[in-house]
Every structure is written in structure tokens, then in C-alpha cells.
Image (cartoon, coloured by chain):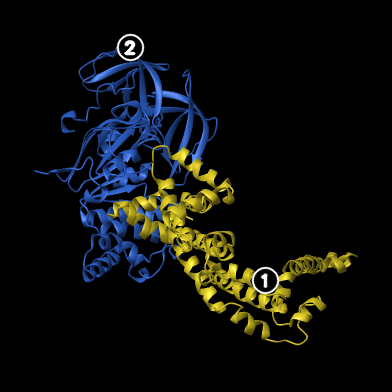
Chain colours: A yellow, B blue
Amino acid sequence: MSQSATTPDNGWRKHMPVINAFLRYGILIIIGFMMLYPLFWMIGGSFKNNQEIFSSIGFIPKEPTLDGFKKGWETSTEYTFATYLINTMKIVVPKVIVTVISSVIVAYGFARFAIPGRKLLFALLMATVLLPKSVLLIPQYLMFREFGWLDTYLPLIAPQAFAVEGFFVFMIIQFMRSLPMEMEEAAVMDGCNSFQVLTLVVAPVILPAIISVALFQFMWSMNDFLQPLIYLSSVEKYPVALALKMSIDVTEATSWNEILAMSTIALAPSLILFFVAQRYFVEGITSGAVKG
Amino acid sequence: MTSSSVRLSAVTKSFNGTDVIKGVSLDVKQGELVVFVGPSGCGKSTLLRLIAGLETPTSGEIVIADKDVTYAHPSKRGVAMVFQSYALYPHMTVEDNIAFALKIQGRPKAEIRAKVHEVAEILQLDHLLQRRPKALSGGQRQRVAIGRAIVREPDVFLFDEPLSNLDASLRGQMRVEIARLHRKLGATSVYVTHDQIEAMTLADKIVVLRAGLVEQVGSPMTLYRHPANLFVAGFIGSPRMNILPATFAGSTADSVRIQTAQGSLIIPRKDVSKPASDKIQLGLRPESLSFAAPGAEAHLTGYVTLIERLGGETFAYVALKEFECEPIIIKLDGETPVHNHQEVALTIELKRAHLFDADGLALGHAPDFDPAQV
């Protein structure tokens, strides 16, 4: 006690942690703000009028107006923006569901069953992750044309029922590998068949992984532009991504405030879903299954 | 007549061409608690998993309650298993964990509730039924795992090292609890452990396994007093039996004369035939050695090299004169005055001495042992 009082540099060393924290958080906040500025600008811009968007760099509107939202919602087509939002959901929701089901089943097969040639099959699946999506566009387009599926949502949804996203399968396999085999053996002893083991025991335990997969697929599908562009031709079936692009094309003088307003709305579902599901990323519900 | 509850006939199991179980035949009687012991990798867990149906044998036959279940699904064998890691379902409450097997069987809800509560009462889990496994202590989790087995009312309980994840004091407590439960339920049980105390205290019958083969089967005291070979003698008992080299010098109907580095000894031993090689081994348990009383005849002499005082008992390590072997361990009373480098004379309780031939097989048997009874 007495010694520390006589130490000459005691004064500023005592405040080191506070100074440190200020520096660290200060830098992080500045960089974070710079990264997010375009997002703030977009949200701010949706409340501005068209002239102001190009005349100032600040994101706080001088004369806030809801014009962008009103006009943007009506769109330049015969349908309101609601139609496009609903269309998006018609694609995204079934897509997420079939992706989750097929990926979990395929991952379980790879993780737990001694299938002949498992290593080779798994290597092939992983190889598809590296394959650029655009390579498949032409053959797939021709195939779906033969099926008569053009201008329907089927080409966007149906392939996902076969666990085509190797990345998701890989992610779930990694999660399953961390589960104790004994838990599944206990379920077998309790009378479960393989399917019941998966649905009643494994799936609830890997829920965090399943939610991650669902969330990724949801966001990717919301943002997907290329696939709907190729397979959908009638405007009434367009999802949000195409509708936004369309409003840039058709009007001569683009109303940027409308586009920004609708982009803001289009962001909402992903953001809401992310924050609702966030706690599942953190919470590890396997704790307590085994000694730990 | 007591029917056998579990019968294994010449069961073998290989994984990718490696024989793990090399032909095991075994009878477990109704209501018996049989313990499998052996060093790690001896196949004791594999044997249990074969009985459980989690593995299928490469050859041989498994009969449970007079039904051939060699290739039957685990749930159709009338067995329930308690795993080392408890293997509880983390997303279910204690109640759902215990009820799970009955739900899968599609029993009526009222019946399931009644049974779960009955089991919870036996295991003192009533107040924990709505908790998740992660909110339970190790001992409580283990009790839930046992409850999950009991609720199915199986013909046979299988325990795979159920206590090895618990700390020492809790292990002792749960051991007593399992013994109590076994007496109460009277169900046939097969128990795998590497813990000698568990094996000795719980078992009606111990099966000692080594490298996929049964070395000896018998009651705990039979194995302790009359090990059939050097491996069992060394494996059962802690500290281990001391082994000294000796040579065979002749036998009569009820005794054997052997020659050691410190002179000859006459060991009371029955049915000893002359071994193929004169080189034999003398086995002495730490408690059948003691300091010779003053004036009495000493069988062995040596120097104390290390003393371990455990309170109630004391272990003295004695380097024997003339012998070319490790110091032997002697179990003494806790208060025995002894110090390092002390020269000591030892007396052997000769009728508790063991003899093994060059192949490690027991040479004859102790005078108080009746081979016909086993």
C-alpha cells in the first residue's frame, strides 16, 4: 500500500485500462461507422426527395418525406410492391424448408452410415462447392425447359430438395461429428429406428446448425438475382430483386428515393430473422448430454 | 432350476479382420450381477455391446431369456443399457428422458406418467423431473440414466463403466446405490468396469478378460484366493501380488518343495504334478507377508526401501537379499514401527502362497480349495 503510493508513475498507470478501452473502442466505432455508412445513407435517402439525394452527402434528411415509400410501394407496374414481396416469400420459404430437410438427411447419412464409397461420394459433394454456379446455367436451363418448368418457381426450389448445397451438408456433418455416438445408441436401445433417431434425438440437438443453414439459405435466396432473372419471364411472378432492377429500367428519370425506400423494406425480413435467430448461434444446447 | 438369463456360445467379433473377441462362451444366471474386468482393449466393452445388439457377432450365438437374439434389434432383446457418458437427451427434461422408450413403444400416456413417477421415486429424482440434463450434477445425471433403463423393465441391465465419469467420493456413493438397486430389483445385470473395487464389491461373478478371451470366471473371492493363472493373480488385488522366481524341487500329495534364492520352502498345495520346466514362480499377496516375530523362523530377509503410510495401513517395499527382482510390497498395520533401510525378516503365510508354472498357469491348488465346487 505505502509502496504504491510512493511510486511516481502511479497516477497515469492507474488509468491505463480506461485509456486503453477508449482507444480500442474508439477505433472500432469509427471503422464500424464507415463500414455501415452506405446502409445508413440508404435508409436516410429513402426519406429524402430526389434532388436532395444528389445534393448532399449527409444521411439525415433535411425535409423528411414518405413520398419515396408511397410511390415506391405502388411501383411503375400494375402490381404493388406487396406482390413482389409475396412472390419472394413463395420462393424463399419452400426453398429454405426443402434445403434444411434434404441437407440434414444427407449429412446424417454421411456422418453415421458406412455407405460403400462414402469417401468418394463426399469428395464429389465437396467438389460441387468449388464449381461456379454459372457453369451450370445453360445445361440446367435446357433441362428445365424440357420439363416445361420455365416461368415457374420450380427450377428455383426443386433442386434444393436434393441437398445440392454442399456447403450446408458439410456444415451439418461437422456439427454431427461433435455429438456423442452414445446418445444415438441410447436412442436405438430405447427402440428408435434410424429415422426416429434423426428426427427425435439428433435434429433437436443440432438445432443451432439447422437454424444457421436456414438463415443462410434465406438471405442468399432473398438476394438471388441471377436465377429468377433466367427462369422467370412474367412480371407478376417477379421477386423483389427483379422488381427493384425493373424500376431502374423502365422509367426515364429514375426515382432513386423510391428505389432506396423499397430496398430498405426488402432488407427488413432478413434483418428481423437474423436478430430473432441470433441467440441460437450462441447457445450450445448440447451441453449436459455428456460429462462437461 | 435356475435358468440362465444370458448365454453366449463361442461368440467372436472381428473389426476389419482384427479379432477383438476370440470365442467367448458364458452363462449368466437369472438375477446375477456379472462384472467384466480386464485391461483396456481386452474386449470387455465390445462384449457388452454384442449383448446389447449395438454390434453383431462375426460368429457364435447370443441367447437372452431363452430367445436367440444373435441378430435381433437392440430394442427387441429385452435389454437396457447405462452408458459411461450417461448419453442423456439434452433437449428433453428428466421426465421426458425417462419416458422416451415408453413413448416410442406407444404406451398410453397415463401409464407412462405412472411408471416415470414410480421410477423417479426409487431413484429420488421426483423433484428434478422438469429439469434439463445440463442443470443436473454428475450423480443426478447418472441416476437419470439408470432410471431410463429401469423404466423399460428389461430382462437384463447392461452397465458400461457407469461410474468412471464421477469423482471418487460420488463413485463410492453410487456404487452402494447400484448394489442396493440390484438387490431390490433382482434383475440380471452385466457390468463392465476397470475399477477393481467396483468389481469385487458388486459382482456375484467376475469374468476376467484378456485380449478377447476369458481368463477366469468365478466369485470375487474365488478369483482372489485361487487365481487360475498369473494374469488373474496380478490383475485382481491391489497392490498387486508379488511374484518371485523359484525352482521346483519335488512334491508330495499335499505339499510342494521349492528352492528360492534364499533357501528352500515347503508350500502346502494339493494336486501338484511335476511341471514341464523346473522354473516356477511364487506368488505372495502383500497381506500374506508379515514381519517375523522375534525368535520365530524367517522365510525371507531384506531391506526396506520405501514406506507408504495410508493411515489405517502401511505398505513397506522390501528389496530381498539374493533375489534378482523388484522390491516386494508388504501390507502392515498402520501403526507398525518401521523405517527406511531397516533390515527385516519376513514370515509367509504359507497356505496363502501361490505357485505358477513357467507358462503362468496355477500349479495345483491351495489346500482349502475344492475344484469340484466351481
Q: Does the residue at mark 1 contact the one at mark 2 (Cβ under 8 Å)?
A: no
Q: Which is more toward the observer, A156 or B205?
A: A156
Q: What's the CA distance linking mark 1 and mark 2?
A: 101 Å
Density class for disc 1 (Cα within 10 Å; few <14, some 14-19, many ≥20) is some
Which quadrant would the N terminus of chain B be assigned to in this image?
top left
Residue A283, image x, y percentages: 52, 64
User: Could you tell me which chain the residue with mark 2 belongs to?
Assistant: B
Which residue, given by chain and number where applicable, does mark 2 sit on? B277
Residue B208, image x, y percentages: 31, 35
Q: Secondary structure at mark 1?
A: helix
Q: Secondary structure at mark 2?
A: loop
Question: Which amino acid type corresponds to the residue marked 1 in the rendered image?
Answer: Ile
**Placement of B340 over or under A167, stated as above or below:** above
Residue B307 numbered tag: none
**Disc 1 vs disc 2: which is toward the camera?**
1
Kindly give the residue lying farthest to the right in the view shown: A8
Which quadrant would the C terminus of chain B be assigned to in this image?
top left
Which residue, given by chain and number where applicable, does mark 1 sit on? A248
Q: Quadrant of residue A30?
A: bottom right
Residue B278, image x, y percentages: 33, 12
Question: Which amino acid type corresponds to the residue marked 2 in the rendered image?
Answer: Ser
> Residue placed at 40% from the left, 59% from the top?
B139
Residue B203 seen from this side: no
> Residue placed at 23% from the left, 63% from the top?
B106
**Placement of A208 over or under A264, stated as above or below:** above
How many numbered tags mark residues here?
2
